[in-house]
Image: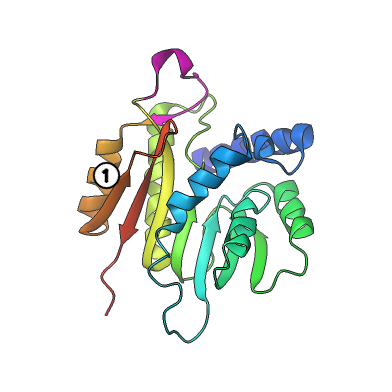
Amino acid sequence: MTCDDHALHEGIARYYERRLRDNGPTPQGVDWNGAESQQLRFAQLVRIIRADHGTESDGPVTLNDLGCGYGALLTFLVEQGLDIDYEGTDLCEPMVQAARACHAGVANARFRIGGACSRLADYSVASGLFNVRQDVPVPLWEKFIHDTLDDLDRSSRRGFAFNCLTSYSDAEKMRPHLHYCAPEEIFRHCKNRFSRNVALLHDYGLYEFTILVRKQVG
């Protein structure tokens, strides 16, 4: 990790530590507007694993959640009845502590501090990880996005999913501390670098898009 990477990670951790302190383990605590949009967002990400749910396997589908926050995605997975072996990773230590407290006793689930996935899983997801750029220069933030996508790819056997704020957001609602991605550019990057099977979801009513990258297995 370079000095730039270390400083970037520290800035992310401090930002979310403040959000958690001010708002607690809530959607606002991870910089989302509310629970309804959070649930809609999770429904898009989970599409990457739906094909495996309910099929014969040797056990639960394994999932990495990078930038897991307080573990709201795990709550969603449990409520959906999905059989998942879950590992959440986050840079912010207080956020990981909150996640552990919120999900004590949940089977096949663990949380750890870190900036990258620690294992090869069936799938990996990242929700909101690329949104809050703060004052990081755009080229450095774009490098962070690309490096993180490489990690998601390395850590995923069957595929991965992530979301980004869209450059097609209404101009008057865009904020200077947030990062807005051109969906066609991210789609092209994933198509050229990771897999032929890439889906771009930009039709679910939020100022963002979700990318699903499915790998050829076997």
State which region is magenta: 169-180
Report whether residue 161 is seen. yes
Q: Say whether residue 174 is magenta.
A: yes
Q: Is residue 165 left or right of residue 76?
A: left
Q: Nearer the viewer, residue 10 or 175?
A: 175
Q: Residue furthest bottom?
A: 58
Q: Residue at x 27, y 57 (%)?
A: 194
* Image quarter in which the C terminus is found: bottom left
Name the residue tied to disc 1.
187
Q: Nearer the viewer, residue 210 or 185?
A: 210
Q: Amino acid at mark 1?
A: Phe
Residue at disc 1, secondary structure: helix
Say if 5 sits above or below 51 in the image: above
Q: Position of residue 138 (x, y in %)?
A: 40, 28
Say if 29 sits above or below 64 in the image: above
Q: Position of residue 213 (x, y in %)?
A: 32, 57
Report whether residue 1 is seen. no
Residue 193 appears in which quarter of the rendering? bottom left
Counting labels gives 1
Q: Residue furthest top?
A: 172
Q: Say whether residue 65 is magenta.
A: no
Q: Tell me, what colour scheme is on the image?
A: rainbow
Q: Position of residue 166 (x, y in %)?
A: 38, 31
Residue 51 appears in which quarter of the rendering? bottom left
Q: Residue at x 44, y 26 (%)?
A: 137
